[in-house]
Image: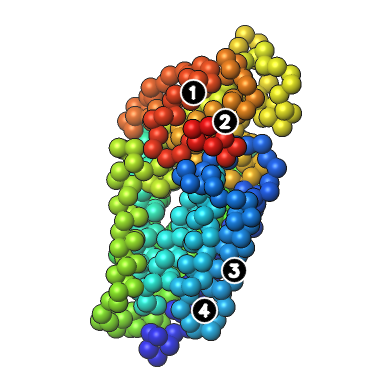
Amino acid sequence: MTVSALPTRSLLPGLWWSLSTAALFAATLPVWRPDNDSLLPRIPLFEWGFWIPQWLEWVSLAGGGAGTVFVAVLVHQNKRVAAGVLLWTLSTGLLVVADQLRFQPWWIHLTVAGVILACASPRRIPKLWTLFLVGMYGWSAWSKWDSSFFVTHGRELVSGLMRSVGLKQRLSPELLSWGAVLLPLGESVVAALLLLSRTRRFALFAAVGMHLLLGLALGPTGLNHSRGVVVWNAVCIAQLVVLIVLLNPSTTAAEASSSQVPSSRGDAFAASVLGLVMLFPLLEPRGWCDPWWAWELYASRPARADLFVARSLRSDSPSEIRRYIEPEVPGREWRRVRIDKWALEELSVPVAPGPRVQLAIAAAICERNRWEGECRVDVAEAADRLTGKRTSRTIIGIDAVKNELENFRLNVEPRDRQPGG
């Protein structure tokens, strides 16, 4: 049997992609709906995103769904799926430009995987997808080899895993930190083993186990994060299972013969896109690459911005906002606004790490509610990788917060306020 005749090579990748996009859209539907009534500000990615009308967002949402269906239909008919992937990418890309909260890491994952699926030949898809996962796991592990991770997010993930399997005993912070080491260690080992053909299948099975543990830690019985995060881990497992099928012993001879087939232009284009995506994180230290583009997943090192309001905040603020303001603490003049919790509960997505989106949302909330001197933003710069120490500063008042936004290249103005208005 030739490689082109293997049904798994033409059917399974397309099915995985179409089912994954449908599942993640369904899990995070509130953030994609143009008519969601959340008061959380919408920040376009570029200034021209202000001019995207709601009807066009609805058309784009329908286009994304149609693209998913087209891929499923075309792959069953043994036809190229490029048209469906292109429709999905353009449609969802327009929605991302209209609201940066839609710019999620799973969207980057499926977009890159879709480009490979659409452009590369069936013989090259498994190899390119495997290299993509090597980069994703490798960069994700690198972001966690950081002292701040082992005392913050890492401990939280270990505690969530223990809770999910019914272990209620309390471990010391030191033991939780040692347990946290297992996550970047596991990602590093999986990335290294995926590079070697002889160990690739072992790495794939190990990665499946890692995602299952993450799913338990982040799921309803653990930390109870958003549905999208849990579904994305399931999507990664499904992709690995597809690769296991494509790389099983029965296809070893076909894999060897396929390496003798010259690469097409589509293969070269897909490989070029993959190379750019995997090298782009090198620009993150210079501020040209957002943490999620650098695959800093569950990392604690990125800079952050937290919004606080005065204890004497006026009682006429909207109740929807007040429910996300932490209770008063005796002796403290300021209360934190839980923007992260707000996004998770109402839009089913986390807020991107890094200060740009967080500061933009904070400024929009303060300006909309005329909080003037009643608000402040604490900005913590990226943590030192070895010591975990951060440089922090406090910005008080709307004008000072807005001045801070002038340092960013991408748009930071909300949809309800035109740029320069």
* Cα–Cα gap, marks 3 and 2: 34 Å
Label 3, on which residue? 66
What is the x, y in percent for residue 365? 60, 29
Q: Nearer the viewer, mark 1 or mark 4?
A: 1
Label 4, on which residue? 75
In this rendering, does residue 16 appear at all? no
What is the x, y in percent for residue 369? 65, 25
Label 2, on which residue? 364
Would you say 221 lies left or right of 240 here? right
Q: Residue at x 53, y 57 (%)?
A: 92
| Amino acid type at image mark 2 | Ala
Would you say 27 lies left or right of 254 here? right
What is the x, y in percent for residue 314? 70, 17
* Cα–Cα gap, marks 4 and 3: 14 Å
Which quadrant of the view contains residue 177?
top left
Q: Nearer the viewer, mark 4 or mark 2?
A: 2
**Which type of secondary structure does the marked residue at label 3 adopt?**
helix
Label 1, on which residue? 401
Q: Residue at x 61, y 60 (%)?
A: 59
Could you say which is closer to the camera, residue 114 or residue 259?
Answer: 114
Badge 3 local density, few (<14 within 10 Å), some, or many (20+)? some
| Amino acid type at image mark 4 | Val
**Which type of secondary structure does the marked residue at label 4 adopt?**
helix
Would you say 40 lies left or right of 265 here? right
Mark 1 touches mark 4? (CB < 8 Å) = no
